[in-house]
Image (tube, rainbow, N blue to C red):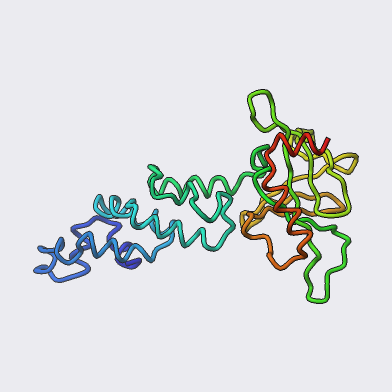
Amino acid sequence: LRSSAWMLSDGEPKSLAMLCTPQEASIGTVLIQKSVITEAMRFLTANELATVSSVSKLWNETSSSDTIWRGICLRRWSSVWRPWGYSNATMEAKDNPAPWKRRYVIAEKDATRHSLTKDELVCYVWRFHFTAQVPDDDGTFNYQYVRFVATRDRKGRNDSKGFLHMEQGYPPLRYCLEERKLHGKSIKVIIVEHFPAHTMTRRPDWRWEINNMHVQLVSMHEDEVPKNRGAKRQAHVEHIARMPPMTRTSNSQ
C-alpha cells in the first residue's frame, strides 16, 4: 500500500496504469475497491494515513473512516497511560459523538500539556516516594499511595487548595495549587505546607509527575494500586477514597 500510495501521488488515472495493464486499468474501481483500501489502511500509522489521504478523493474519504481511526486510537493508547481511565472512558465510550480521528487529535494534543488542573490533581491516586529513599532488594521502592483532597467552594466545585492525605506517619498536609514566575514564565506549582515548591511535568508515557528535590509523585488510577500491600495501608487508601469531599476536609481540619 505504501508503494502504491507513492505511485498514485501524481494522479489516479496515471497511477492505475502503472499498477496494472490497460485492460485492468479500465476497471480499476474493481481492483482497488474501498473495502480493500480500508483493510490495507488498518495497518498504517497516523502519519502514514495523513500521507496517503492526498492520493485521491476516495483515499481521503477512506483514510478518515471511524473504523480505521478506532484501531489506531486503541493501538496507540494501549502503549501509554490513559488519563481518562480504563473503564467506561469518555474517549473510548461507544456513545461519544466525536469521530475517532478527532479523539486521536484531542488525546495527542493533551499529551503535550504540562500543567495540571485542580480537578485532575484530586481525581488520581499518586504514587509517592522520597528521592533519597533506598530501593528494596528487588529494586523497587516502598511506595505510598496518596491523594490530594480539595476543599469546595460555595457551589460545590473543587478549590485550588486542600489537604494531601498520606498513608502513614503524617497528618493531612495542607496544599495549594498556584502560579509562580520562573525564568520569566508563569508556571503552576504545588505548595505543600512549608516544603519546597513542587513542579509538574508530563512523562513520555503520558503520566503526570510531581516532584521537588525531596519527593516524587506519579499519577495512577485507583485500579492500578497494588492489592498485595499491607492491609492497614490499603484500608487507609480505600477509606479516603470513599469519604465525600466535604467530610474529608472537615475531618482533616
Q: Nearer the viewer, residue 133 or 158?
A: 158
Residue 10, quarter of the rendered image: bottom left
Residue 160 image offset from top left, x and y in percent: 72, 33
| Residue 33 in sight here | yes
Is 74 on the left-hand or right-hand side of 58?
right
Of 210 and 52, nearer the camera is 210
Residue 201 x, y percent position in the rendering: 70, 49
Extreme residue in the bottom direction: 137
At which x and y percent is residue 75?
47, 62
- In the image, 220: left or right of 195? left
Which residue is rendered at x = 78% and y = 76% of the image?
Answer: 138
Can residue 183 be seen at all in this image of the molecule?
A: no
Judge left or right: residue 4 versus residue 13. right
Q: From the image, which quarter does the N terminus lie in?
A: bottom left
Quarter of the image for residue 67 reads bottom left
- Closer-to-camera residue (228/134): 228
**Residue drawn at (27%, 60%), measured in percent from left and top?**
8
Q: Is residue 248 above or below residue 68?
A: above
Residue 115 rendering spot, x and y as whole percentages: 67, 41
Q: Quadrant of the C terminus?
A: top right
The image shows residue 95, relative to residue 55, as above or below, that is above
